[in-house]
Image (cartoon, rainbow, N blue to C red):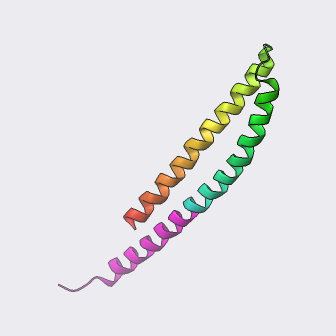
Amino acid sequence: MRDDPAAAAATHRLQAVLAAAAQEARATQTLLQDAMSTFASTSQQVVSVVGGSAQRIDQDMVQSLQDALRRSRSAIDALGAAGSATRTIG
């Protein structure tokens, strides 16, 4: 049985695309981690200033900051999983 050049070329293209996707996921993950680190620090400063406030607007702001941090962590995890999955397939 002979090798199919078209299938080999398609496989090579797919591997190249998957490698690029894995690299992009890793790069985006790193950028988001760096941005989240800065945002977490700034958020913590806000929380320490208004965290004990009984005013609803302050409580809502603290909750929003905490939600943003939690969602950022989820996005970082998802990018890591996507990078791993594309490396595994490729």
Quadrant where the image shows the C terminus: bottom left
Q: Residue at x 44, y 75 (%)?
A: 13
Q: Is residue 16 above or below residue 79?
A: below
- The quadrant in which residue 67 appears is top right
Q: Residue furthest left?
A: 1
Q: Decide if residue 49 is on the left or right side of residue 11.
A: right
In depth, the one of 56 and 40 nearer the eye is: 40
Q: Which residue appears at 74% of the width and 47% of the height?
A: 38
Which quadrant of the figure has residue 26? bottom right
Which residue is farthest top? 54
Counting from the top left corner in percent of width and height, residue 43 is at 75, 36
Name the residue: 33% across, 77% down: 7
Tag count: 0
In-front residue for pair 54/9: 54
Residue 28 position in % (x across, y down): 62, 58
The quadrant in which the N terminus is found is bottom left
In terms of secondary structure, what is the magenta stretch mainly?
A: helix
Where residue 80 appears, as percent x and y from the top left, is: 51, 54
Closer to the camera in the image, 4 or 79: 79
Residue displayed at 62% across by 42% down: 72
Residue span colored magenta: 1-24
Give the percent coordinates (x, y) of residue 24.
58, 63
Is 59 in the magenta?
Answer: no
